Image: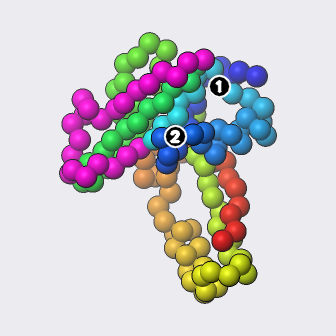
Amino acid sequence: IRVPGLAVFMSGNPIGTPLALRHNVIHNKVLHQTVVILTVQTADIPHVEPGSRATVEEVGEGFWRIELSYGFMEEPDIPLALAALRRPGLQFDSDVSYFLGRETLLPSDVPGMAIWREWLFVWMSRNAQTATHFFRLPAERVIEVGVQVEF
């Protein structure tokens, strides 16, 4: 079922389907009228000119792929960058829903890493800055879809 509105699904990989999109369709059985798969890249330069920050591709059937590039000295502001895009069919307003994939790490007895290192890694992961805060997403518009990962 297609529901009205625009949904942004953030993905670390510009190829493939984001985890949050897949799980949203499988479990909620809905898809927004307009779907943006967004990837944010960090360039090897300090600053990226705003005019060359975005690559936009209309995939069809209401799907879009957008890549945003930021310099390593810049702090990403996703809502601001998306609002600057002017494309027919894309209206980034205050009603946009941002979907993020969230992985909960679970230490396991599987051979590989020492268990104390696994627990340390989990602790560090839980204390890292959230994607919502890092990308300056409006917290009231963010939906996190999670999976548990044993390692």
**Residue drawn at (25%, 52%), measured in percent from left and top?**
44
* Residue segment shown in magenta: 40-61
Q: Position of residue 80 (x, y in %)?
A: 37, 34
Quadrant where the N terminus sits is: top right
**From the viewer's perspective, is 134 left or right of 42?**
right
Does the magenta segment cover residue 68? no
Say whether residue 69 is left or right of residue 125: left
Q: Choose the circle earlier in sequence order: 2 or 1.
A: 2
Residue type beneath disc 2: Ile
Which element is circle 1 on?
Answer: strand
The residue lying toward the viewer, choosing from 139 and 110, is 110
Residue 32's tag is 1
Q: Give the residue at x 49% y 52%.
A: 131
Residue 129 sits above or below residue 117 on the image: above
Assess whether residue 54 is covered by the magenta stretch.
Answer: yes
Report crowding for label 2: few under 14, some 14 to 19, many 20 or more residues within 10 A (C-alpha): few
Q: Nearer the viewer, residue 135 or 64?
A: 64
Q: CA distance from mark 2 to mark 1?
A: 20 Å
| Res. 41 visible in picture | yes
**Residue of label 2:** 15
As helix, strand or loop, the secondary structure at mark 2 comes to: loop
Which residue occupies 49% across, 15% down? Answer: 89
Quarter of the image holding residue 109? bottom right
**Residues at circles 2 and 1 in contact by the CB criterion of under 8 Å:** no
Residue 138 numbered tag: none
Q: Amino acid at mark 1?
A: His
Does residue 23 sit above or below 92 in this rendering?
below
